Image (tube, grey):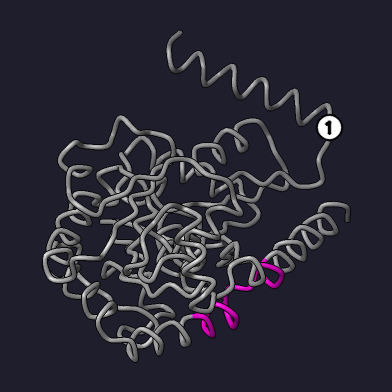
Amino acid sequence: MPTSEMHGRSVLWLRQLIGTFRPDVVHAHWMPFAALGALAGARPLVATAWGSDVYGVSFKHRMLIRLALRRSSVAMGDSRDLMTRLQELGPSSLQTMVVNWGVDLETFAPPNEQERTELKARFGIGPGPVVLSPRGLKELYNPGVVVDAFRQVRAAIPNAQLVLKHGGVADEMKPEWTSVPGVRVVGRIGYDDMAALFRAADVTVSIPTSDSSPRSVWEAMAAGSATVLSDLSWVHELIEDDRDALVAAPEAEPVANAIERLIRDNALRGRIVSSARQLVENHRDRKTELARVERCYLELTARSRK
């Protein structure tokens, strides 16, 4: 079926669905879906961008974003940098809201050393320092750089271990990654297990080429795992290098140096873990963020009924 025909059928189906349920608010996550909502006549429409649906998109997709934003009551995103991109594409009257979906501060809580040891054993991981790469295997997330960096770390710290997490797309895994001593692969797991994995990790690495305030980073920070982050605009909105995380270029040597610093320097790691947890409590509490979204829904509903 041609793409245009599929698109037309999707709009028709969504228009019928809206007519049947008559929702008070339609909230579209991912800008192409927001464009479908706009074409289907969804009102009021909330459009949430997630990053890769805005950064580096084609001319065609930029036109769809412009359409969605012209017909949206509110545009949301999880960083000021992403909001700036949306404001550049949207009308001057566009109402925007920076919302990060937040972290469950009870589930993602820092463990004590005994708990961390038990969590490592739960995943079949040895007692040495654990580095977690949770972002998947797409080229965007630079998994090859993570493995190359870990290879350097492992040469200096022989009991270091790397957990390569993927979302069930194991065919993206390259044999040369899994052949590195100390590398363990974990596929799709449940929410509670993911929280436990963050709590088991001494260090979490997130070094994508492009990104916008990923929840996984905030979850790692909340869970007591010191983070190594790529030097992107969203990072510097709240996170301070050497205080809340270590920021590095997404290249093997600087990433390896940052990981090794965190593993060897217990005082540095402890200070970063403590500061990062406080940052999450102050700015990324899930209850607070969801309450803000709820207020937005109520305001839009009240406005549409006038």
Residue 67 pos. (x, y %): 51, 41
Q: Quadrant of the C terminus?
A: bottom right
Residue at the image position 28 percent from the left and 77 percent from the top: 263
Q: Measuring 81% from the left and 58% from the top, which residue is drawn there? A: 303
Residue ID for mark 1 = 21
Q: Position of residue 44 (x, y in %)?
A: 72, 48
Check the image and report above or below for 306 versus 270. above
**On screen, 115 above or below 196?**
below
Return the residue found at the far right. 306
Q: Main secondary structure of the magenta part?
A: helix
Q: How many marks are shown on the rendered structure?
A: 1
Say whether residue 297 is magenta: no
Q: How far from the left and from the top, in percent, is residue 224?
A: 48, 75
The part of the chain drawn in magenta is: 277-289
Q: Please give left or right for residue 120 compared with residue 139 in the image.
A: right
Q: Nearer the viewer, residue 27 or 179?
A: 179
